[in-house]
Image: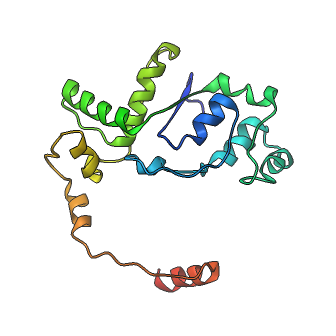
Amino acid sequence: MGLPLNKIVVSVNENDILNRFFINNDYSKQTVQETISPSMDISVASNFERLIYDFYCDRDAKICNDFYANFPLDSINLPNNMWAKSTELFLSYAVNDLQTIKAIQEVYESHNYLIDPHTAVASVAVDNLSKQLKNSTLILSTAHPAKFPDSIAEAGIAIKEIPKRLSDVYDKEEIFYEFLADKNAIFNFIASNN
């Protein structure tokens, strides 16, 4: 889209399927480990197939489909000449929970600014890859730290203020519905309750 990016840093927690791909050309599904950065607790990346299709396969659907033919039973390993494109755009780093907590503490102590665990994962990755990065680095954060009170408490920090919109959610009654694994039942429910 024209944004002048030099590199995209892929920062992940201990569920490192993307890091394994960008470092070792190994996109294999493994058991998910529960971490303090839960949005990164994945065994398969939801948009990875788009990346394969657009970036590596030059939008050739047949080649992309061939890679996914036996996944997740078999791992995806791109031909070396195709996978080598990774180094043009991507850097990757995996971060554990201890590093995440330490980053939350360090940013708070240094800048009096509280970050959430996912932002902390990105911060650790950027710090560890800083020698390979040129120009300015931007970390995109989307979660408020108050959504992760246990992690913030583990870092030894008190959350001073919870945004009203978030505190309102905590006060609401949780409602859930159970369905059979039948897409029609789910679609019908959504259509009749929308």
Residue 174 image offset from top left, x and y in percent: 32, 75
Q: Which residue is painted at 65% across and 45% down in the image?
A: 48
From the viewer's side, name the closer residue of 169 and 35. Answer: 35
* Image quadrant where residue 85 sits: top right
> Position of 155 compared to 158: left or right?
right
Residue 51 image offset from top left, x and y in percent: 67, 41
Q: Which residue is painted at 41% across and 35% down in the image?
A: 121
From the viewer's side, name the closer residue of 99 and 118. Answer: 99
Residue 120 image offset from top left, x and y in percent: 36, 35
Quarter of the image with the N terminus in it: top right
User: Does residue 16 lie above or below 181 as drawn?
Assistant: above
User: Does residue 98 lie above or below 146 as drawn?
Assistant: above
Residue 154 image offset from top left, x and y in percent: 24, 43
> Position of 100 compared to 74: left or right?
left
User: Does residue 142 lie above or below 190 as drawn?
Assistant: above
Q: Which residue is painted at 63% across and 78% down in the image?
A: 183
Q: Which residue is painted at 73% across and 45% down in the image?
A: 75
User: Which color mode does the image show?
Assistant: rainbow
Counting the numbered discs, the total is: 0
